[in-house]
């Protein structure tokens, strides 16, 4: 599948109808999502034929992108059941089979070794400090091959240090810098739309 | 919830030392055909807890899997087809998962297991 085609399909997905700010629910835009998955597949071979988990899947954008690129088994996890319902509907509209689990990422106790690759657009931790690193820590426990994640560019050195020293990642690389469009979703947003610089990371867990 | 997911989930209640496998009670299940991928099945085989898969499949009325399996079976198309069917084509739509130690029930609704805990029962791994 071509990048533009993937981006187009993802652009048609339904997103949060009433987003929850405490969970930092922001839709993952089709531009970022398609690039994340495209790179994971075409540069690293981490998607097609693999078991891929989407942490904090929301409406399922990243997981659905993984399925479109040939992931054999996709598992989306979210704490919010409304999001999971939208994710299920989005997958069904594209005739994809996505597996969903209603759970808090912090309390996953999955058996090791089943999941190859974790993809995620974590909460950036602007409401609850460190939320993105909680996701990353669990991602590195669950994945046996790689974790793809987005973190604010301003936190780059902190993310790298924490991943390598505390979460025992074998490697932590910024693949590219992207703009995350934050539409005016919530009342406290004064500006119509702002964009935030985010890094697309690839982490490799210890084998 | 397909049985590969069941083979991965374990009870996340605080204090539980062996929360796997979750016991399965099924009210409604469906079958959906999935494209057969022998390489995927072979790669997954060493990671699967075989007995848990056999028992879960039986709960869904599918008893064609051998009780024990070793890698030599992966050369048999007949075996791979059965293993494929059990692992990927059976979906629990409505039912419950039950913690083997505490008996805590995790409902499965519309195919989605609810593993959300109350604050006081959480097993925070972080």
Image: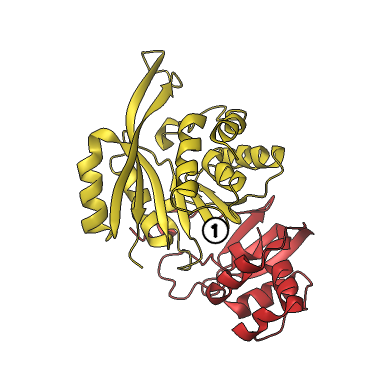
Chain colours: A yellow, B red
Could you say where residue B111 lies in the image, as x and y percent from the top left? 68, 53
Could you say where residue A170 lies in the image, as x and y percent from the top left? 29, 60
Q: Which residue is at a point 31% across and 33% down the rendered structure image?
A: A126
Q: Is residue B70 visible in this depiction of the protein? A: no
Q: Which residue is at a point 48% across and 33% down the rendered structure image?
A: A28
- The image quadrant where one finds the C terminus of chain A is bottom left
> A177 above or below A113?
above
Could you say where residue A168 lies in the image, as x and y percent from the top left? 27, 61
Q: Nearer the viewer, residue B53 or B99?
A: B53
Q: Is residue A35 visible in this depiction of the protein? A: yes
Q: Which residue is at a point 50% across and 48% down the rendered structure image?
A: A41
Residue A69 horizontal side relative to residue B119, left or right: right
* Residue position for label 1: A50
Could you say where residue A64 lies in the image, as x and y percent from the top left? 59, 43
Residue A163 horizontal side relative to residue B60, left or right: left
Quadrant housing residue B59: bottom right
Q: How many marks?
A: 1
Q: Nearer the viewer, residue A76 or A119?
A: A119
> A175 above or below B15?
above
Which chain is mark 1 on? Answer: A
Residue A74 horizontal side relative to residue B123, left or right: right
Q: Nearer the viewer, residue B93 or A169?
A: A169
Helix, strand or loop at label 1? It is: loop
- The image quadrant where one finds the N terminus of chain A is top right
Q: Which residue is at a point 40% across and 70% down the rendered structure image?
A: B15
Mark 1 packing: few (<14 Cα in 10 Å), some, or many (20+)?
Answer: many
């Amino acid at each position: 599948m071509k990048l533009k085609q993937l981006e187009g399909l993802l652009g048609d997905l339904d997103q949060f109808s009433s987003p929850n700010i405490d969970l930092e629910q922001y839709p993952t835009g089709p531009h970022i999502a398609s690039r994340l998955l495209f790179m994971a597949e075409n540069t690293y071979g981490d998607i097609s034929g693999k078991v891929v988990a989407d942490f904090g899947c929301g409406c399922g954008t990243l997981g659905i992108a993984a399925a479109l690129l040939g992931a054999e088994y996709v598992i989306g996890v979210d704490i919010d059941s409304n999001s999971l319902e939208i994710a299920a509907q989005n997958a069904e509209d594209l005739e994809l089979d996505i597996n969903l689990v209603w759970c808090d990422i912090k309390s996953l106790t999955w058996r090791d070794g089943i999941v190859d690759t974790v993809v995620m657009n974590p909460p950036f931790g602007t409401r609850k400090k460190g939320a993105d690193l909680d996701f990353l820590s669990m991602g590195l426990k669950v994945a046996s091959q790689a974790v793809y994640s987005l973190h604010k560019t301003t936190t780059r050195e902190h993310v790298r240090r924490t991943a390598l020293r505390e979460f025992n990642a074998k490697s932590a690389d910024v693949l590219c810098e992207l703009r995350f469009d934050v539409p005016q979703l919530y009342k406290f947003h004064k500006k119509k739309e702002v964009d935030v610089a985010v890094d697309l990371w690839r982490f490799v867990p210890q084998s | 919830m397909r049985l590969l997911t069941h083979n991965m989930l374990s009870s996340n209640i605080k204090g539980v030392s062996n929360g796997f496998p979750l016991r399965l009670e099924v009210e409604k299940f469906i079958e959906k055909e999935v494209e057969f991928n022998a390489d995927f099945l072979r790669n997954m085989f060493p990671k699967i807890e075989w007995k848990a898969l056999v028992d879960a499949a039986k709960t869904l009325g599918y008893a064609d899997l051998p009780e024990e399996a070793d890698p030599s079976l992966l050369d048999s198309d007949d075996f791979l087809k059965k293993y494929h069917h059990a692992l990927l084509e059976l979906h629990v739509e409505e039912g419950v998962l039950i913690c083997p130690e505490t008996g805590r029930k995790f409902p499965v609704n519309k195919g989605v297991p609810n593993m959300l805990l109350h604050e006081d029962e959480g097993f925070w791994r972080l």
